[in-house]
Amino acid sequence: MTVDWSSGRYESTAEMLHPAAAVVVGAAGMRAGLRVLDIGTGTGNAAILAAQGGADVIAIEPADRLRAVARERALSAGLEVDVRAGHAADMPVEEASIDVALSVFAVIFAPDPAAAAAEIARVLTPSGRLVMTAWMPVGAFAGVNRVAAQLAREALGAREPSAPFAWHENNAVADLFAPHGFTVESATHPILFTAESPEAAYDMSQDNPVAVSVRAALAAAGRSDQVERIRSEGISQLRQHNEDPAACRVTSHYALHVIGRR
Ligand SMILES: C[S@@+](CC[C@H](N)C(=O)[O-])C[C@H]1O[C@@H](n2cnc3c(N)ncnc32)[C@H](O)[C@@H]1O
């Protein structure tokens, strides 16, 4: 199923993921004049933080609507961010021109990870590095997404996809970037999500483009009857991982990789 990242309202997910962008930008270390590239910027979280840190920032984003949102956010913060159309495997960026590439849960969507790695290696300077995040495949929202994908596949009669590239694993990422002379250092970080209840947490997540695209695919196939079942299984995942019986507090974890030539 193809995700239309311009659909829904990614802005609310971006707010929830802002702490991860701050971790990435902090790990990369900003300073005036640093040439930074934010790959899959979405609404511009990491790009804007990097620009606030004094960096010269280019942001790449394939979705038209999100590029417009990112530009508008940077503009209203009085910051210069050069937002360009492109995707991880094909970026309108000069060779060896980037000191630090950032990617917060975005390069992980590249359909051809090897092509993305080659393109990132092309744009980085010899001492440049990529700082990126990838979800660990465990926890509440990993469960919500897993059951949604599985039930939607069943309803649509779609085949089980081949295993996705293991962007969360140090070894997999190290193998991917090794041909370009890069090594990888990885750490795991938590990110907390809170809501009034598991139901509220689930419903808040449903304007995300991935959830919107699942519902659109079900509607197109005349299987909207599955939406309620997917919701109830998703809420059950959130209940299983809930750390606050009076409301909803769930922790997800992500891998932070620092990838560079050392
Ligand atoms: C989960 S969002 C993350 C957005 C942003 N980095 C943030 O932290 O909020 C995933 C983003 O990856 C973008 N994306 C999808 N496929 C991509 C690709 N092949 N290359 C680069 N970005 C991609 C989407 O358009 C979307 O903006």
Image: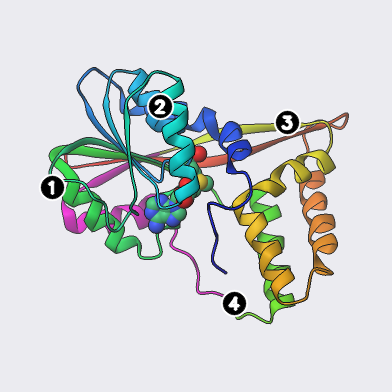
Task: Please name the amino acid that badge 2 sits on.
Answer: Ile
Question: In the image, is residue 244 part of the stretch drawn in magenta?
Answer: no
Mark 1 — residue?
95
Mark 1 crowdedness (10 Å alpha carbons): few <14, some 14-19, many ≥20: some
Mark 4 — residue?
160
In the rendered image, the quadrant that contains the C terminus is: top left
Task: Please name the amino acid that badge 1 sits on.
Answer: Glu
Q: Which residues are magenta?
A: 160-186
Q: Residue at x 50, y 32 (%)?
A: 20
Mark 1–mark 4 contact, CB under 8 Å?
A: no
Q: Quick check: is the Cβ at mark 4 less than 8 Å away from ligand 1? A: no
- State the SS at label 4: loop
Q: CA distance from mark 1 to mark 4?
A: 38 Å
Task: Please name the amino acid that badge 3 sits on.
Answer: Thr
Q: Nearer the viewer, residue 215 or 158?
A: 215
First along the sequence among labels 1 and 4: 1
Question: In the image, is residue 164 part of the stretch drawn in magenta?
Answer: yes
Residue 201 vs 120, above or below: the answer is above
Residue 181 vs 76, above or below: the answer is below
| Residue 150 rendering spot, x and y as whole percentages | 68, 68
Mark 3 — residue?
194
Mark 2 — residue?
48
Task: Please name the amino acid that badge 4 sits on.
Answer: Glu
Q: CA distance from mark 4 to mark 3?
A: 32 Å
Comparing labels 2 and 3, the label whose residue is closer to the camera = 2
Q: Nearer the viewer, residue 1 or 128?
A: 1
Q: Quadrant of residue 9?
A: top right
First along the sequence among labels 4 and 3: 4
